């Protein structure tokens, strides 16, 4: 794969982040609760600062939007979207469903994504027009289009559970071949690798999914919000599928507003 300087730096930053994460994961650290009731640790902050330095040293005129340290130069054409430890609750409780998410947006379009999961020893990455890769091997979505043979993974779904569309989700659960809740980065890695077929979430942050959307898209999948809109900084929902046909059929059924 021919990597752009952007992707090379993103991978370098993810690898440096893993060194920090590994240092804290097996040890002791204090946990603080943010105003939104989500946890944050010194590991989150130190990891983001490590990523930020590498990226802004390489591209000082770029913007940076981090989960913990906020925005820098947000009006720049190129903006990096970073969640240093997506899945801090998992990290704090000592199980491996956490990852580092690094994405690059150019004039509103997501063009680079790196998703590194230290606990799984998995790094997925992609950039526009270059395909998607997992641990150095090219990956593609699967070819199952029959709903009765598909695997559906549900992530954060509190909001959709309170809406009329929950009835439709319940019908899908009965129709698909298999229902799971792999969650966080992991079901997107599985989708991009052809191992599951549909992911649905209604309560996410763009920093959680920006990189993953590039990876799934470059693997041949379709990734929008639950209304079929392209991702923006305000996106909070996801419908990601292995095929455009399945994606359209589910959008039509959900009619999500």
Image (spheres, rainbow, N blue to C red):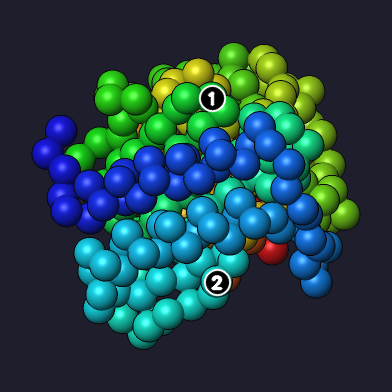
Would you call the spot at circle 1 few (<14 residues within 10 Å), some (14-19), or many (20 or more)?
few
Disc 1/disc 2 C-alpha distance (Å) = 26 Å
Q: Residues within 10 Å of mark 2 (few under 14, many from 20)?
A: some
Is 116 drawn above or below residue 227 in the view shown? above
Q: Which residue is mark 2?
A: 69
Examine the rendered structure and indicate whether residue 63 appears above or below residue 238: below
- Residue 132 in sight from this viewpoint: yes
Q: Count how many numbered circles sit on residues in the image.
A: 2
Q: Measuring 59% from the left and 66% from the top, which residue is drawn there?
A: 68
- Seen in the image, is 237 located left or right of residue 37? left
User: Which numbered tag is attached to residue 84?
Assistant: none
Q: Position of residue 80 (x, y in %)?
A: 38, 65
Taking depth in this image into account, of 192 and 87 the one nearest to the observer is 87
- Tell me the quarter of the image containing the C terminus: bottom right
Q: Quadrant of residue 46?
A: bottom right
Q: Secondary structure at mark 1?
A: helix
Q: Residue at x 51, y 66 (%)?
A: 66
Query: Is residue 235 visible from the viewing direction of this image?
Result: no
């Amino acid at each position: 794969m021919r990597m752009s300087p952007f992707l090379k730096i993103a991978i370098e930053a993810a690898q440096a982040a893993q060194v920090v994460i590994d240092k804290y994961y097996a040890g002791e650290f204090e946990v603080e609760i943010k105003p939104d009731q989500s946890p944050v640790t010194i590991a989150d902050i130190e990891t983001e600062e490590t990523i930020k330095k590498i990226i802004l040293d390489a591209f000082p005129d770029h913007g940076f939007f981090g989960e913990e340290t906020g925005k820098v130069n947000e009006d720049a054409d190129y903006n990096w979207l970073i969640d240093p430890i997506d899945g801090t609750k998992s990290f704090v409780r000592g199980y491996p469903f956490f990852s580092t998410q690094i994405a690059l947006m150019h004039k509103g379009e997501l063009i680079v994504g790196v998703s590194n999961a230290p606990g799984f020893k998995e790094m997925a990455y992609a950039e526009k027009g270059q395909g998607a890769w997992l641990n150095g091997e090219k990956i593609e979505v699967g070819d199952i289009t029959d709903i009765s043979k598909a695997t559906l993974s549900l992530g954060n779904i509190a909001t959709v559970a309170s809406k009329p569309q929950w009835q439709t989700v319940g019908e899908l659960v009965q129709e698909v071949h298999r229902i799971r809740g792999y969650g966080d980065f992991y079901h997107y890695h599985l989708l991009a690798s052809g191992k599951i077929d549909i992911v649905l979430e209604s309560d996410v942050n763009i920093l959680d999914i920006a990189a993953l959307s590039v990876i799934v898209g470059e693997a041949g999948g379709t990734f929008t919000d639950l209304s079929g809109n392209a991702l923006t900084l305000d996106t909070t929902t996801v419908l990601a599928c292995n095929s455009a046909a399945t994606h359209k059929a589910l959008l039509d059924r959900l009619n999500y507003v």
